Image: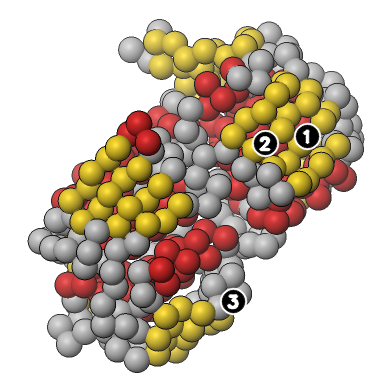
Amino acid sequence: MLEKLVINGGKPLNGRVRVSSAKNAVLPIIAATMLASTPSRLVEVPHLEDVHTICEVISALGVKVTKDEANQEIRFDASEITATEAPYELVRRMRASFLVMGPLLARRREARISLPGGCAIGSRPIDLHLKAFEALGATIEMGDGYVLASAPEGLKGNQIYLDFPSVGATENVIMAASMAEGKTIIENAAEEPEIVDLVTYLNSMGADIRGAGTNVIRIQGVKELKGATHTVIPDRIEAGTYLIAAAMAGGDVYVENALSEHLKPVVAKLKEAGVTVQEDVDGIRVISDGNVKAVDIKTLPYPGFPTDMQAQFMAFTTIAKGTSTVMETVFENRFMHVDELKKMGAQIRIEERRAIVDGVPKLKGTEVRATDLRAGAALVCAGLAAEGVTKVTQLSHIDRGYDNLVGKLKGLGADIVRVDE
């Protein structure tokens, strides 16, 4: 049995769609619940495969996880962390599982984790995490496919410079340092909104962290953190995906709960391409007739153009008048969607980390496969704008990061169904 999305394209999108909480914010925050000696509650948690996986990981470590699906709430009781080894079969499903290392080191002074899996979009090494843990006084041993970190005397604050502003490494170090002895300064820290959200949650638990959202973060370690209630920020990548879908298919769509300050580069590029974008405090409205012009993008760490929007934006440029270039600087293997877009008639050629896209008047529906999470989203956007029927396979990737994608698109008038074939 193979599940597919079947999209009958060429229909404009109209109406309102609400963005769920951010996948890339909720995962580290769920890992951070392990730091609290009393229960925590997360509100408006999206129904995502990755959320399910990280909950399984921390459950295996002794955290009591109670889900209230109807109200999209999850309660976490981490008063007793009973294990320090994250199970291989869970970690290999998702890279973000590695985020439990910081909390485990802080709470139990030891962590053993198998090397992570997740999307196949490049090396994404964990050496930045490990170097930082060593700077905090942990001893690192690499075994047969796993990492063992231990700090029997507890972690000690230190000055840490990250060679690259890695989001995961920044988050892992913040969590570890929040309960380390003394002061930690992280330089060249990642500045993403998801990091600000993690720090907001940690500070509400009693942590003392300043500078989130800048490239220097200062952390004064505390002895204990208590549970808190937190609502996770909206998902800027989900919001951006709906903006692209509307810009490609044409129509008039209001994306509720989208924070425009988190999406400045995407909004700027859509406007440059001739799309009407209106921003207000409650969301972003896109009005498009599908006639758009070529633009160039280059992915960069935040506040630059997000690598997680590159695939969707490349799909957009395939129907833009003229020649666009898409430069990927963050991950080296993030052009796997190119061959799938070409099956739909896109004119794209690759030169190392640059894709050159010659716009075509229309894409043609065909069968394509989601090679990773954002590639899947890009193919859905392409299918909505294409002539004829597009079938997207390998939906497990899309399920990792989009809550109720089919239902939300149907609400905008898209002709899309999920079928078993």
Q: Nearer the viewer, mark 1 or mark 3?
A: 1
Give the mark nearer the N terminus: 1 vs 3.
3
- In the displayed structure, would residue 214 be above or below residue 370? below
Residue 255: mark in rendering: 2
Q: Position of residue 89 (x, y in %)?
A: 21, 44
Three-letter amino acid code at the position of disc 3: Asn
Three-letter amino acid code at the position of disc 1: Val
Asked which quadrant contains residue 44, the reply is top left
Q: Find numbered disc 3 in the image and state the secondary structure of the residue it sits on.
A: loop
Residue that numbered label 1 is attached to:
286
| Residues at marks 1 and 2 touching, judged by CB atoms closer than 8 Å | yes
Q: Is residue 328 visible?
A: no
Q: Position of residue 71 (x, y in %)?
A: 37, 36
Residue that numbered label 3 is attached to:
215
Q: Is residue 77 visible?
A: yes
Cα–Cα span, label 1 and label 2: 8 Å
Three-letter amino acid code at the position of disc 2: Val
Residue in front for this viewpoint, 414 or 140: 414
Q: Find numbered disc 1 in the image and state the secondary structure of the residue it sits on.
A: strand
Give the mark nearer the N terminus: 3 vs 2.
3
Q: Find numbered disc 2 in the image and state the secondary structure of the residue it sits on.
A: strand
Viewport quadrant of the N terminus: top left
Instruction: Describe residue 135's horizontal placement relative to residue 268 as left or right.
Output: left
Q: Residue at x 30, y 79 (%)?
A: 179
Q: Nearer the viewer, mark 3 or mark 2?
A: 2
Residue in front for this viewpoint, 390 or 400: 400
Q: Position of residue 45 (x, y in %)?
A: 41, 43
- In the displayed structure, would residue 362 be above or below residue 158? above
Viewport quadrant of the C terminus: top left
